[in-house]
Each structure stands twice: as structure tokens, then as C-alpha cells.
Amino acid sequence: MQLPLTALHSTPVGMGRLRPLQLPDVGLGALTKWCPPELVDRAIDKCNRREQRRRLLPARTMVYFELARSLHPGEGYASVYEHLLPGDDELDLYLTRRGFRVPNKSSLCKARGKLGATVMEEVFRQVAGPIAEQFDCPSAFWRGLRLEAFDGTVLDVADTEDNAAEFTRPAGGSGKGGYPQARVVALIECGTHAVIDAAIGGRQQGETTLAMALAPSAGPGTLVLADRGMPGVPLWTAFRQSGAHLLWRLKRTTGLRVEEVLPDGSYLSRLRLDKNLQAAYRRRGQVPPGPVVLRVIEYTVAGSDEVYRLGTSLLDPEAAPAHELAVLYAERWESEGIYAEIKTAQRGPRMVLQSNHPEGIRQEIWAHLIVHHLTRDLMLQAATAVKPPLDPDRISFRAAQRLVRRDLSPLLSPL
């Protein structure tokens, strides 16, 4: 194995195998399918982060280093970097003789700063998206429409002046919170928990404001679900203009006039922009969006007197029966599931994002979203490797990530 160090940098790394999840072996080919070095290089070039001369910590290495940090939260920089090195005694001895040492924390911090957040965001945008096919994952669809949902969460970040100024702290009855918080709103595929698109901002930015950026990623052939904090004419209009159908819960205080009662008991109405928002649009020289027609479904659940109201763009009660939509709305909670997976299983409970500057915080968040997508992609492959296919929800996210942590390192090696 007498390879010069320069050759090692360009030598392909072995694929490796995942251990079975009570299923046939799942190969790591999924990673090279959507996150190969060529894809990472395209993101680096697009963001103009290509180094001018060869370095020990080139941009490509730092992308994979950031992914490894998401897989090993709480570990030091040097320890994370060691996870990227091939576990080969002969190669270790060779590198030692050549004077190779694990870079120190200062060098890794500087390299992270040079990489920035835009490269990680671009990698995410190239790999993210729906992954289910109707023939092997029918739970991701309803009457031919792909089920999607969006919701938001907040993440505690390092308590520094820069982070506090960018993301702001939560305020409560006892004063300001201990940590600044970044807000993330994600559009997900309900059946697989795969993140399709995401937007990052500060706590001071509302979920509906960030969600506006997600509308183009929905598109035709989808049914997008959302909770009652989201409905509004601008956001509804943006998602409908993308071609998506909508099923959103309406606030109890939303006043709607019954315009036509339909045979199944649902009724047609219009959602209008209030006068203050109309005036704000005109002050900006913009034409306010007009009222939107929607179908309203009201129902109760056993054991509760609360009346639930859903608004949908599916106006035909025969093509979209009210009782089916009422049952289907529960899929909206799948968006809560992905945040639990990222914040608890992947990042670790009560863990704080460590970067001292907002750019580093965004870099960490995009890396977490990428790693989550990788894990969910592998879980779907495992679920569909058997006949008949399993529902991906039958596979443990924690167990899948343990396998990823154990077997992914050789593939991510900077060598």
C-alpha cells in the first residue's frame, strides 16, 4: 500500500455496508447517489469557495467534516476529524511515517469560517427533495397527491453577542431566555419525513414569513398540510400559485361567510385580506392579493366538544370526501416528528449549537438537515428492500443513525 499522500487524496474510498435493520443489508450507495464529491464540488464552485492552492483542509473536506460534526454532536473538533480517517492499521502507520497529524481546533475553526454557510445550503438544496415513489411507499400519497406539510421550530444557539443580535432571545414572564434561538421552518414529505425545503431566520421572524420562501418547492401534484397558525391570504396564494393543493386548519377566530353548502355538509367561503394589510400592500406600491375561495370542513372528535375547522383548495366533495380529509389532517403532525428526530435523536437533547457567529450557526443547521435527509433516504431504501415494502415509520430513526455513524466514516474520509 505504498501510495504517495497526493495519490491518497484522489483515491476512491471503499463503499462499506450497513448492518441489517431486521432487513437485508442496506448499502451506502445511497450517499454517493446524492452527495458524491462531484456534487459537493459543484456547490463549492457555485459559491466561489474553491481554494487557490492545495491545502490540508480544502473546502470539500470541510463539507464532510461539518456533516460528521452533525453525526457526532458534543465531540471535540479533533475527535470528529478522526472519525473521518479510514480505520486501517497499515494506512495509519503510513500516514504517521509521512508526518500526518490531525489538524488542531484552531485550524479547523478557520477552515470552517472560510467555507461559510452558503456552501452547506447549496449542498442541501442539491440533495433535498421528496424521495417516495407511490408504488413502494403508498403512505406518502393520498388519491395520487403527494402529502407534504410545513411547520417551524426553534434551536438554542451559543450565547454570544453576535448570535443574540442576529437571532434574539425568547422573552417570558421571568425575563429573557438563557440562549438566543434560531428559527427553522421546513417543508417535509409526510410519508418519509424527508425535508424538501427549509428556511432559517431569527426568533423575531414569524413562521409565516419564513414559510413564504417554501411555496415554490411544493408544486403541482402535492397536498400541503399546515396548522392553524399559518392560514392567511398571502401565504395561501403563494402556495396555490405553485400548483399545490392545500389542507390547513383555520383559526377559531377566522370569520368566514357561508356562501354555498355542499352535499357532504362542508361549505364554500372566501378568505379575505383585512383592510390594514391591504393598505400596507398599497403603501409599498403592490397590488394586494384578492380573496381566495376555499372549502370549509367542520367536525368534532369523540370525547371533545371542540369544533375543528379545515380549509382546503379541494372544492369537489366527491373527489375529496370531507371525512377522508378530516382523517388525513392528522398527517400534519409528521412535521413535528422530524424536529424531534433532529433535536433529540440526532443533535442530542438539551444540546446547544456551538458556533459563536451566525454564519457558523447557519452552517451547522444546514449540515443537520443534510444528515437527517441522508438517514431518511437510507431508511426508505431499507423499508422498500423487502416485499411487500414496509412503512418507513416501522424503522427506528435512532437505530438508523447508529448504523450511519458506525459505517459512514470511511466514505466521508478526506483522504
Image (cartoon, rainbow, N blue to C red):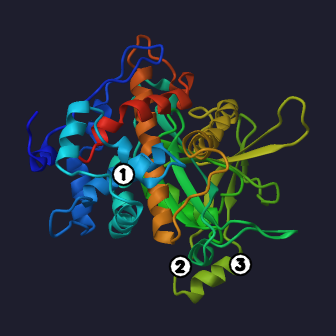
In 3D space, how far apart are the residues under numbered discs 1 and 3 (Cα atoms)?
51 Å
Q: Position of residue 62 (x, y in %)?
A: 32, 56
Badge 3 marks a residue whose secondary structure is helix
Quadrant containing the C terminus in the rendered view: top left
Which residue bears the numbered disc 2? 287
- Label whose residue precedes the other's in the sequence (2 or 1): 1
Closer to the camera, 262 or 243? 243
For the residues bearing labels 2 and 1, Cβ distance under 8 angstroms: no
Closer to the camera, 365 or 239? 365
Q: Position of residue 329 (x, y in %)?
A: 66, 38
Which residue bears the numbered disc 1? 65
Question: Badge 1 local density, few (<14 within 10 Å), some, or many (20+)?
Answer: many
Q: Which residue is located at x 62 percent, y 36 percent?
A: 331
**Residue 275, labelled with which disc?**
3
Q: Is residue 153 left or right of residue 30?
A: right
Q: Decide: is 350 above or below 50.
A: above
Q: Position of residue 52 (x, y in %)?
A: 16, 70
Q: Amino acid at mark 1?
A: Phe
Q: Nearer the viewer, mark 2 or mark 1?
A: 1
Q: Position of residue 208 (x, y in %)?
A: 61, 63
Q: Which residue is located at x 53 percent, y 23 percent?
A: 395
Closer to the camera, 188 or 297? 188
Q: Decide: is 240 above or below 96.
A: below
- Label whose residue precedes the other's in the sequence (2 or 3): 3
Q: Amino acid at mark 3?
A: Lys
